[in-house]
Structure formats: C-alpha cells, structure tokens
Amino acid sequence: MFAPLPDKPDHDALEREILALWESKETFARLREQNADGPRFSFFDGPVTANKSLAVHTSWGRTLKDVFQRYKALNGYHQRYQNGFDCQGLWIEVGVERELGLNSKREIEEFGLAEFSRRCREVVVKSAAEITEGSIRLGQWMDWGRDYFTFSDTNIEYIWKFLRIVHEKGWLFKGHRATEWCPRCGTSISAHELHGSYVDRVDPSLFVRFRLLDRPGEAVVIWTTTPWTLPANVAAAVNPTSTYGRLENGDWVAVARYPDEKFLEQLPGAELVGWRYEGPFDALGPGGEVEHRVIPWDDVSMEDGSGVVHIAPGCGAEDFELSKALDLAVIAPVDEAGHFYPTFGWLHGLSTGDAAEQIIGDLDDRGLLVEATRHEHRYPECWRCHTPLIFRLSDDWFIGVDEVRQPLLDANETVEWTPEYMGKRMDDWLRNMGDWNISRRRYYGLPLPFYPCSCGHLNVIGSRAELEERAVEGLDQLEELRRPWIDAVPIRCEACGESATRIEEVGDVWLDAGIVPFSTLGWENEEFVAGGYGTGAAEGLTTADLPTHATWEEWFPADWVSEMREQIRLWFYSQLFMSVALTGRAPFRKVLGYEKMLDEHGKEMHGSWGNMISATDAFARMGADVMRWQYCAQPPDRNLLFGFGPAQEIKRRLLTLWNSAKFLGDYGAIESFQPAYADLELGRPDADLQPLDNWLVERAAQLVAEAEAGYERWLTIDVTRAFEAYVDDLSNWYIRRSRRRFWDGEEAALRTLWFGIVQGLRVISPVMPFLAEHLWQALVTDVVQGAPDSVFLAGWPEARTPDLALLAEVAELRRVVALGHQARSASGLKLRQPLRRIVVEGAPLAAAHAAEIAEELRVKEVEFGHVDAELRVKPHLPALGPKLGKELGVVREALQAGDFEELDGGRFRVAGHELSSDEVLVERAGKEGWAVAGDAGVTVAIEIAVDDELALEGRVYELIHRVNTKRKDEGLELTDRINLTIPAADDELLVHLDWIARETLASAVVSGTVDQPVIERA
C-alpha cells in the first residue's frame, strides 16, 4: 500500500532518516559484498587536510568522488573506497601556533618540539573525526575507519624509499640559491606551492639615483618596489639594445620610458655597460666591499620603471641566476625571520617591512630619492599564513627534474583529462617546472632521511629497518618517525663508519600525498601486515592493512582521480612525478578537474566578509542533496557560484519530481495499485500500453542512455540536464496528458508512470542519493514484495537504443504546443479561455497529433499549412560582433532589408554568411486578429478573436478551476464527492452542467444566492 507523501520534502530530516536506514540495514556493506566478484574500479582519494571541519568547498570534490563511485557500484564494480587524510606541514603547524599564541620558530622551540608535535597530532585526530562525520552527512560512502593518514610511519617509510631511489639515480642535491621564503614560517616555498598565492598588493614604488663614480654629477636611476633589497644591491642592469639618455639634472634613464623629456645626451645601453657607481648603502658595510657596475641584460623591460633594473642576487631568483652568469657578488641581507643581520648597521633587527620607511627616509635625506609613490601589483604570499614572501638565499634540498622531464611529459600523454585543457596545463607545468625544492625548515612534517657525514658522504636511509640497523643510539625513545625523536638517532656512516646526524629539515607535504598510490597498496611489500598502515602517529586511528605487492599490481594505476584545478601543480604533479620516478608510468588513467568555488554573487568566500557558508549550516538549511545538485549541475570548466539563493531554486525544481511521485502514490493508494518489479527487469511495463505510454517508456530508455553517457564522460552536468528534461516531460506531458486515465484508475497508466519514475530514481541516485532512496522506499520497497530494499542494490538500468523516431515525433509535438503557449501568452489570453483556430507550419511530424494540440492549447480547429506572418530578423550582437567584425554592418543592413534566406533549424543565410539560431533575434508578426510565435523553423499562428460561445466556455473553465482550488484548500480527498452551489449570476453556465459535475466530482450542481461557489461533502 502506498503511503502518502507530504506536500514537500524536509530535506534535512529526510536525509537523517535515510542515514539511519543505511546504517541499520548495512546497505553499504551489502553493496560491497554484492560487487566483491565484479570488475575492479580503482580510485585514489586525494587526502583532505585534517586541520578543520568539513567545508562546502571540500564537499564539492567529495560529492563528485561519491557520485562516480556510486555509479560504478550500480554497474557492479568492486572498489576499495579508501579515504585519506593529509596530516603534516604548515597546514597543521600554523593553526597550533595560533592556538598556543606562538609567533615564531624560536617560541616553538622554547615550547618544546615533543609537546608541539603531540598538539599537532591532536588537531589531526579531532579534525579527521569531524570531517568523517561531515562526509557521512554529505552521503559519501567510504570505508570509514580504514582511512590512510599521511603521518603514519608506513607512509613515511615509503617516501624514504622513494628518496633513496632518487638519490641512487643521482637526482638529489643540495642547492644554494635565492628562493621564495616566508619570514613568518621561516622556510622556503616550492614553486608549485605558489600557484594561486598571488594577491593584489600596494607597495612603495621608488626611483633611486645610483651616483656614477667616473662621471661626476651624473647618476643612473633605477626603479624598485622592494626597498629592503637596496642594501644588497651589487649592479644596475640596462638593455644593451635600448637607448638611454641624460636629463638636465644628470640622471640617466631609458628614453622610451620618458618620451616627453628633453635629453642632453643619448647612448645605446651597450655603451653604459661597465660604468661604475656608488652603491646606495655602501656605508653600512657589506655593500662597500662590492664594486658596483652597470651590466647588460636583454630581459630589461621598457614597459615600466626607468629602464634600469636594480640587481640584488641575494634577494631574487632572476638576479641570482644573473650573478652566476656574470660572476657578480651575492649579498644576503636578512635572516630566516626576514630581519636584517647585524652587519647592516642601523638596519639590524628590522624586518623587511619595517625597514622600508626608514630606507626611503634615508635615501631622501641623502638626495638619492627621485620619487616615492605607491604601486599596486600582484605579489606572492605564503599559502598558509598569508605573510608576503621575500626572496632569500637558502641552502635547500632539491630533486633535479631534467632527466625526468620528458618521461613525465610522455606519461601525461597517456592520461585522459576532463576538461581537456587541464591536461595541457599539466604539460605546460612539466615543460617549465624547475627543480623540486623538497625541504622545509619546520617541525611537524616528514623527517628527511639525509645524514651528511663529515667525511663528505651523504647517507640516505630507505626504511625504518635500515635506521634501526645503523643507529648509534636513541632507538629506545623513538616514539615515531618524527621530530624531535628522530633527531636523537644518529647513524653509522656507510662510507667511513663515523657517527652522522640527520639534517633538521622536514619534507614538502606533497611528498606525503604523492606516495599514496604506493604506500596504501603495498608496493614491493612481501608480507601482508594486518593493520600495518596504522603505525607511528596513525596508530589507533585506522585499521588499514599493509597489503603485499600483489594488491598494488591489482589496483595500480588508478582508473580515475579527481580534484580541483589547482592540484595540477600539487597532488596530481607529485603523484605523477613519484610514479614516473618509481615505475616509469602515470599513476592514473583518467582525471576530472574542476574550477574554484565562489559565493552566489561571484565573490571569494571569507569569514571576515560574512559570506562563508559552513557545511553544517548548508546541511541544515538546504540539505545534502541540494548541495550535491549544485555541485553536479556545474560545468567543471567554470567557477561554481554556491549559495542559499541557488539552493532555493534547486529545491523548487526538485518539487516537480516530488510532486510526480506524490501523484503516483496518491492515485496508487486509491486504486490499491500493485506495481510489478518484473517491469523494471523487462525494461517496460508488461501491459497493454497506449501510444503515450510507449513514448514514456522510450523516453526513459533515452534518459538511461543520456545519463550513462554523461557518467562515462565524467560530466555530471550532462546527467542533471538530462534528468531535469526527463522529469519535465514526465510531469508536464505524460501525467498531464494522462490525468483522465489516472482518475479512471487505468492500470496501464499507473504501471507506466511507476516504471518511468522508478527508472529515473535509479539514474539520478548517484547525484542525490537521499531523495532517490527515500522515494525508492516509498514507491518500491514498501509496496513491491521481494524488491531490493535499496535503490543502490538494484543495479544500473539496462541500456538500450530508444525509438528515436517516436521521440522525435513527440518532441516536435511539444515544440508546437510550447510555441502555441508562447503565442497565447503574447496575446494576453489565459489558457482557460478556448480559442477557435491554430495554424502550424514546419512541423510535419506533429500532424498526427492534431487532437492533442487542440486539447493542449484549447483550440477548436488545428490546421497544418502556411502561416501568413512577417518575419523580422536582427543580429544578436554579443554573439555576432566578435564573429563577423567589420562584416557585421553589411549583415545588419541585409537583415533589415529582408534580404536573407531562412534555413532549417532556425538558421539563416545572409550576405554570404550562415547564422545559427543563437546568433539572431527572430520576431514574427501576424496579421490582425492573430498571435504568432516561431522557433527553429516551426511557426504557429493562433486566431485570438473570442465569440460568445468561446467566452461562455472560458467562464466554465474558470469556474472549474475555482472549485477544484477550493476542494484542495478545504482538505478534500481526491475521491470525495461534493454538492456544488454556484452564484445565480452564473446560471447560464449550467448549460454545461454535466461537464462541470464531471470535472469537480459534484453529485449535484445548483445555483443559489451566493457570491462565490460553495461546496460541501455529498
């Protein structure tokens, strides 16, 4: 027996009920058991950072992962479902520092590294629990409790093994170079971490004189937006092919930068090369030991500044490379915290930011400041703490990329990227990437297993077993492979036998995540270890096993992975790099990327702006299904505008499905309708179907095919579009056209509608699992004996080729009806007002459906023939302007003159150009007394004159509408019969008494002294 559904769903309450249902019936476990012998679908989960609760941004990616895993499960695929947590690095450290009120590395060390590490672990434990809870609430099915944690000793050992192999290949080296540096965190930053870290920033803009030593009274003028780098100046660069000129005051600048100035002398840049000058801060010490000269540099730009570039190799990557090429001195002015060294006199102890104003003031006092303004530009900041970065000389550990660059490009060629342009971005990154800076001068991270010995040999430990074998002392206190405990374990040098101590640096966090395809699958592991992944800091947090190499062979590479676009240079890159280094091939076959999330108005989401939405709030106010719909209805190549406004619109649209299911349930209960599950297995209702029933069956087959194609292309937007169009057809065509049959309790109609709705639920269940499951329970489990008790145990509907001819015929019919409604609307006549005639042109397939057109549009006569209408065509300027350019004017004049040819599909040929339907604006004007509408080659004209007969019928329709609205408002059941009294002023309507009684379920219809219709139960 069908249970009644409420008027609309309470998404939050409904979803919590379904979560409880899945848990009580162990639905997910049974699904995995059902698919255990099926084909393998391998998916690697990109680890979510365990430093916060679940966010709506993270929910987007988690939804997409869940959607495709559910779809594959419906198709019988066996999967691993392993969730991952990223657990180390600045993400974790900075939050703990803030919580403890620590503001520097010195304060962390004073607090104590052991306790600091324990506090970091506590953050991970708490966050992992909150993210798990939020992900479950989102509807994500994963093997919770068997997660991987990147801070496990097992994961760390696998990275050690990778680094040992890299070392053996000769790719590992310690580099001395100027690198991006966060002065607050006290560590260098890798190039791939800079992606997305540039912000708009206003800095000082200085033009400064460098006085020439051999040309008294003259100076070269440089431009800089980093005043703190001036004490480290060693040279001034000019473009040797550009022209430079001397102004009246003796200043030399690029002529191209000062077109309105008068120059007393002009020389090519090449002739300035070698000029000596006095450094701007030679008096402070380090600069005074350098001979400052003008040098040539082809990259000096004439787009901004003075055309003379200040060179400080200790403060910039390009400057540093230039110093190596030209053998320039290198001055490093600041320490790890970005404070000036003692050798810089009165600048000692000042930060780079604090020193700026004092430097500007000093330059002005000495007559060296030409101009000081403010300059807005894009500038990198620390991705974690948002401190502006500086360039600083640093000794860091690198993996060289030259030997692996081409193998990486070759491996990427084997990967199918969606959207395709993201694969090209990976190619661009691989072609231009620099050596991988893998070291960080921090604490809570992967301990790099590098033990340089005084004999000059670098020892690289490849496993814990090797560490224990070669340890000199400290194993008894080694809680986990992490600072500070690992720092107290020196080893014997394999070259000389002397004791060697580990470097203090920890590793780049992307090593942690990039090794996952190997560490979680037991690559080259010979012995299965139950719970073997839960080691070190991960002990007690996961029961994940350490499998053998056979498992890796079975599941590697991943069939599919998915993360947002910024991961191209991060997780996708680190995985690809490590996999190619270890195996020579890509770790994934297919990738789905997607863009970024903004608020519904297109702004970045920030807590301080008041537009940040927590996942918890979103679950309560919109529901997980509506969130998932927002994510899935988004093209992956565009930013998602997420918010409660779009959520309300989605809820409104989903009511069409809900109302259709409620309609079925209500009429199914009245007729004691018993669906047959065999109809789903057969692929159509086993009944004597009418043509409209056959159409819905074919429409359902088309939905299955379209949705399957969308899922297989990794494009959820194609699935949601297909489903919305299908539900519109089901509700606004099939149900509306069959309403009389439902009133009469016709079983074929009920079976067809049940089949159509339930097939739709099976198709859309991966996208909105809660609503699909709830309606499956109401329409299938509770009423069909022996049916699967979950939509997710029912499998994917068998796809077949639909009857395309039938679908095209009805699609054309619906197009005619839609244009008829458009014409009626333009004339201001309600649908309840019958009209006399419609003429249809350009829709031959609809000719067999004249009776349906007449009924849908409330017209007495339907003709197929020529429509006498004036066609006006205008260019759609936003579309045609960029396409036609100067030709636009010619095309516009031809269209205005009517000099064009109408083609099929809404196309037009004009002035030698073929224009598509979305490149023109079409208006059709009918003759007097007619309303005209047209689109894509189909035109309809409706006669809008209303005679007395038609007017009377219009009043009857209005009366029926008012009475049935009153029935609903007064809570009458669908089957309740009534006695109806109408106002005496409407007596003339009683000529249609039988019609009124039939449509309102009235046992008696009389007129009386009432102002409005009155109803009472019969």
Image (cartoon, helix red, strand yellow):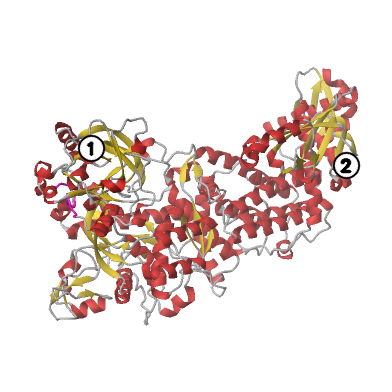
Q: Secondary structure at mark 1?
A: strand
Residue 8 occupies quadrant:
top right
Q: Residue 432, how many percent across, how many down?
A: 40, 59
Name the side, left or right, on which 585 lies relative to 267.
right
Give the magenta-colored segment's residue range.
329-340
Magenta span contains residue 334 = yes
* Residue 141 in view: yes
Q: Residue 832, how many percent across, how many down?
A: 79, 30
Residue 672 drawn above or below residue 982: below
Q: Amino acid at mark 2?
A: Ala
Name the side, left or right, on which 819 lies relative to 538.
right
Residue 9 shows which numbered tag?
none
Residue receiving disc 2: 851
Q: Residue 938, how many percent across, how many down?
A: 81, 41
Residue receiving disc 1: 208
Name the side, left or right, on which 423 lies relative to 341.
right
Answer with mark 2 or mark 1, whichever residue precedes in sequence. Answer: 1
Q: Amino acid at mark 1?
A: Val
Magenta span: chief secondary structure: loop
Residue at image point 37% right, 39% down: 607
Residue 563 drawn above or below residue 823: below
Distance (Cα) linking label 2 and label 1: 86 Å
